[in-house]
Amino acid sequence: MQYLATEPPAARARVLIVVSSLQLRSAIRQTLQMLRPDCQCLEAASGEEALGVCHAQRFDVVLLDLHLPGISAFETTRRVKQVCPSCHVVLLVEPYEAAWLSFDPLHGASGSLCKDLLFEQIGLLLPKYLPGSDGERGEDVAGALSHGPH
């Protein structure tokens, strides 16, 4: 009897994009899916909406705008981490906020990305936090994601 070796299916990366701007959410989703075609992206426009989605599904990464209507990004982060402790929350911040976030605790978030460099840095997110990504660059991006641009 002969057995064929089969590879397990690649892990499907799951990302929740929480940004109030429909255009920015769409651009982030398109960029992630271009870089990682197997990436499943869901979207939410507020912290409350994100929490509802997180109660129904698990995510590898939640990209969370620091400025949302309704509950704060920090409260959203806290609640997301209660529901799914293994989920990485990455805050999307303005350039002027990146400096104070590097000194202030991220309130449970895994890191931050500066909005003005978002599309240049989003590819760095993949090997760091998404399953099935090439992890060779993981160490290189740890500082960029944890402390924002320098």
Image (spheres, helix red, strand yellow):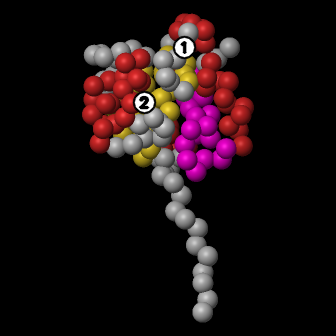
Residue range in magenta is 117-135
> Where 116 falls versus 58 (above or below)?
above
Question: How many numbered callouts?
Answer: 2
Q: Position of residue 58 (x, y in %)?
A: 39, 43
On the rendered image, what quadrant is the N terminus found in?
Answer: bottom right
Amino acid type, mark 2: Lys
Picture coordinates of residue 36 (x, y %)?
A: 53, 46
Q: Nearest the camera: 60 or 133?
A: 60
Q: Measure the C-alpha gap from mark 1 to mark 2.
A: 15 Å
Q: Is residue 112 visible?
A: yes
User: Is residue 95 at all visible to an observer of this figure?
Assistant: no
| Mark 1 or mark 2, earlier in chain | 2
User: Furthest-bottom residue in view?
Assistant: 1
88 falls in the magenta region: no
Instruction: Please tell me the numbered disc located at residue 6.
Output: none
Specify the amino acid type for callout 1: Pro
Q: Which residue is mark 1?
A: 105
Q: Is residue 22 rendered to the left or right of residue 34?
A: left
Q: Residue at x 54, y 58 (%)?
A: 10
Image quarter for residue 18?
Answer: top left
Q: Residue at x 28, y 16 (%)?
A: 70
Q: Is residue 120 magenta?
A: yes
Q: Secondary structure at mark 1?
A: loop
Crowdedness near tag 1: few (<14), some (14–19) or many (≥20) residues, C-alpha within 10 Å: few
Q: Which label was assigned to residue 81?
A: 2
